[in-house]
Amino acid sequence: MKINKDLIERNIISLKTIMNKEINRILRIWPQTILPQVVTTWLYFLIFGNLIGKKIGDMSSYTYIQYIIPGLIMMSIVTSSYSNVVSSFFGSKFQKNIEEIIISPTYNIVIIIGFTTGGIIRSFIIYLLIITTASLFSNIYIYNYYIFLISYVMTSILFSLLGLLNGIFAKKFDDISIVPTFLLTPLIYLGGIFYSIDILPDNLKPLIYINPIFYINNTFRYAVIGISEINIYTSLILMLILIIILIITSIYILNKGYELKK
């Protein structure tokens, strides 16, 4: 099969253009893209970790704030990567400039990678700021850097792709808040960030095992403090499967041009 070098070069230019646009957007409107997440997480550290945590005591041989830090890091990565892509993609869709990309020779996978990269970069910036904030409340160290890096990248990609799909299907600005409000927030709070599965009644424990956030949270907890209530490789495989499903779904929908080609 003959490789069209000119088309490949154009797609590389398209990828760089989308990535530069996403990075500039994040930095240009940082009071909206970065500051709120950092302030919210700081309040979690202050209220749950520092104030309430002193009343709760130790959990799994760690202070309460040390126990919840991995989950708070995970939560910030989930919400920042998701919100960045859904708002950016829908903004492009609302302004009609996404149509120019769709009808261009740009591969759909390039579009996906470009917007997903924006979610990864925003979540990384917020992660650095949150780690700095967390160090003010407790000693921070990473138990397994490899697992942490893999977990961070996979989580960012997973929820960036979910944000992309929400952005595609959204028909008005109110639609981009439906998934965070009615899906992500309940799953996050019921995913074991603030408590151990051991304190749950036996009749509720089976429910947490169908929550994907529970698996992601445990992977981060293992990477940061070295404890997990499930096999972390099961969590990583689950995330990989979900990523593959979302990539295939995104490519299929972009090929069909649903709500994009009018």
Image (cartoon, rainbow, N blue to C red):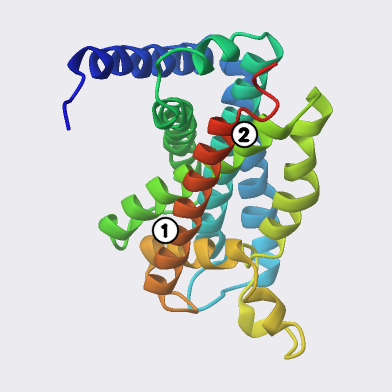
What residue occupies the far front of the structure in this picture? 1
Q: Is residue 61 visible?
A: yes
Q: Residues within 10 Å of mark 2 (few under 14, many from 20)?
A: many
Residue at image coords 65%, 22%: 260
Residue 9, image quadrant: top left
**Circle nearer the N terminus (1, 2):** 2
Going 50% across and 54% down the picture, which residue do you hit? Answer: 245
Q: Amino acid at mark 2?
A: Gln
Helix, strand or loop under label 2 = helix
**Tag 1–tag 2 contact (CB < 8 Å):** no
Q: Position of residue 92 (x, y in %)?
A: 62, 15
Residue at 59% from the left image edge and 61% from the top image edge: 213
Q: CA distance from mark 1 to mark 2?
A: 26 Å
Q: Position of residue 91 (x, y in %)?
A: 66, 16
Instruction: Left or right? Give the position of 106 relative to 169.
Output: left
Secondary element type, mark 1: helix
Given the current orientation, which residue lies at the most extreme bottom position? 202
Q: Residue 137 versus residue 101: which sits nearer the camera?
A: 101
Classify the position of the C terminus by image quarter.
top right
Residue 82 image point, x, y percent? 59, 38
Residue 76 visible in this rendered orientation of the protein = no
Tell me the residue at 64%/67% (across/down).
211
Check disc 1 and give the amino acid type. Leu
* 206 and 110: which is toward the camera: 110
Q: Mark on residue 37?
A: 2
For residue 261, above or below residue 51: above
**Side of 51 relative to 160 (left or right):** right
Q: Quadrant of the N terminus?
A: top left
Front residue of 111 and 16: 111
Mark 1 crowdedness (10 Å alpha carbons): few <14, some 14-19, many ≥20: some
Q: Which mark is residue 162?
A: none
* Residue identifier under label 1: 240
